Image (tube, rainbow, N blue to C red):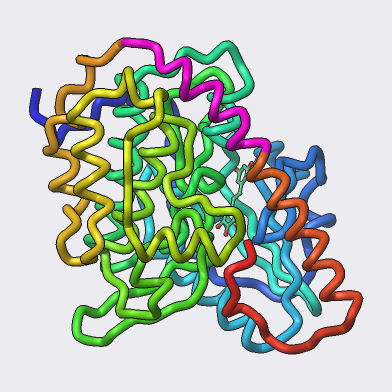
């Protein structure tokens, strides 16, 4: 099999890519019927909505947007989403800037977060399936990198299943941290999620395509074992584990994991950003190019993933409370440069 060919069967109808020009106003309730909540995150709340005229269903993400600097960030997100037309990258349908908020009308996917699905059902996780997921991520990120756009927030929460009955098909969401990348202009940022950020982010060194590749390495590690490779007792310890870049596969959960998979992870978790393989190289790696060779159930990983998912949800709810407390305290300072997510 040609390793560069997608292992996935075609899905039905594809969402038509649109160039979105944000409109003024809070049109949401005039145009759409707001239905069930789909989820929430750093980005605010996401709801299932239905177009009153056409009956078409979408996801609506609404976020507070009060300061001009916040508006600029959302405008950048829209601009980048306009540039990204790929079936594995969630598409934007339209956007509204209200007086104090912004609403994104997005492609609807109904399968929920991938790691939730793996953890909460009688899910038979195998390396064969993990390969399917990581291939789709590499294909999507390869497309972004060819357009010189970095995602910069690849983590389990941002990988959604397309539908409850297509758990092998995923899409990447949240382009709120995505940035254009020009090789000779150093790009430095100080945001992300400690467990998934690369050493260059922690050290405030220049970023590159390898920064996303690191996160794909961490996601693969967690997917195959349910363990978080750099997790410490607190944020500081996690960040110092990242910069120490010590990865091991000593836990019993790795007993059923293939050597090819471990090699794949090790290559992605190299300390030097430029040493990490790119997406196209990854797609040619033996682990990703023999998609049907590891059918053993990774039952230890599923047990650990349940704990992983529960802990991440706890962290997210704590951060939501912190954000609320900050709001109530009336802190007006822009504290986008933190690690609390
Ligand atoms: C869905 C279903 C769902 C969540 C989302 C979309 C969230 C999408 C999203 C997109 C972004 C972003 C944050 C969240 O910055 O359960 O169809 O561009």
92 displayed left or right of 179: right
The quadrant in which residue 127 appears is: top left
229 displayed left or right of 275: right
Q: Is residue 298 magenta?
A: yes
Q: Main secondary structure of the magenta part?
A: helix
Residue 24 image offset from top left, x and y in percent: 71, 75
Magenta-drawn segment: 296-310
Q: Quadrant of the N terminus?
A: top left
14 displayed left or right of 328: left
Residue at the image position 36 percent from the left and 67 percent from the top: 199
Residue 50 visible to an observer of this rendering: no
The single residue placed furthest to the right in the displayed view is 328
The quadrant in which residue 291 appears is: top left
Residue 48 image offset from top left, x and y in percent: 72, 42
Residue 4 visible to an observer of this rendering: yes
Residue at the image position 32 percent from the left and 53 percent from the top: 246
Residue at the image position 72 percent from the left and 46 percent from the top: 314
Marker count (numbered): 0
Residue 260 image offset from top left, x and y in percent: 18, 30
Q: Quadrant of the C terminus?
A: bottom right
**Frontmost residue, 283 versus 162:** 283
Q: Is residue 210 magenta?
A: no
**Frontmost residue, 59 versus 50:** 59
Residue at the image position 58 percent from the left and 69 percent from the top: 339
Does 165 appear above or below 146? above
The single residue placed furthest to the left in the displayed view is 2
252 displayed left or right of 34: left
Residue 156 image offset from top left, x and y in percent: 51, 43
């Amino acid at each position: 099999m040609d390793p560069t060919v997608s292992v996935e069967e075609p899905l039905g109808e594809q969402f038509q890519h649109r160039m979105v020009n944000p409109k003024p106003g809070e049109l949401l309730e005039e145009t759409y019927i707001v239905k069930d909540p789909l989820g929430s995150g750093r980005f605010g709340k996401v709801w299932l909505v239905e177009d009153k005229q056409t009956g078409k269903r979408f996801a609506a993400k609404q976020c507070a947007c009060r300061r001009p600097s916040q508006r600029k960030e959302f405008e950048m997100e829209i601009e980048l989403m306009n540039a990204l037309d790929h079936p594995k990258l969630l598409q934007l349908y339209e956007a509204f800037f209200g007086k104090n908020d912004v609403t994104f009308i997005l492609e609807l996917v109904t399968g929920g977060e991938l790691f939730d699905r793996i953890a909460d059902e009688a899910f038979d996780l195998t390396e064969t399936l993990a390969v399917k997921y990581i291939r789709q991520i590499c294909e999507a990120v390869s497309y972004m990198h060819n357009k010189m756009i970095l995602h910069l927030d690849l983590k389990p929460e941002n990988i959604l299943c397309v539908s409850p009955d297509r758990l092998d098909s995923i899409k990447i969401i949240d382009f709120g941290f995505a940035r254009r990348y020009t090789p000779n202009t150093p790009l430095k940022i100080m945001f992300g999620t400690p467990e998934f950020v690369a050493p260059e982010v922690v050290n405030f060194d220049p970023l590159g395509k390898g920064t996303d590749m690191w996160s794909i390495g961490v996601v693969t590690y967690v997917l195959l074992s349910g363990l978080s490779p750099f997790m410490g007792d607190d944020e500081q310890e996690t960040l110092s584990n990242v910069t120490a870049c010590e990865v091991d596969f000593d836990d019993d959960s790795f007993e059923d994991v293939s050597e090819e998979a471990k090699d794949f992870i090790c290559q992605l978790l190299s300390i030097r950003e430029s040493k990490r393989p790119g997406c196209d190289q990854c797609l040619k790696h033996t682990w990703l190019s023999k998609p049907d060779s590891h059918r053993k159930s990774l039952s230890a990983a599923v047990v650990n993933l349940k704990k992983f998912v529960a802990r991440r949800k706890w962290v997210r709810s704590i951060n939501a409370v912190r954000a609320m407390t900050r709001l109530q305290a009336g802190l007006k300072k822009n504290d986008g440069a933190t690690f609390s997510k």
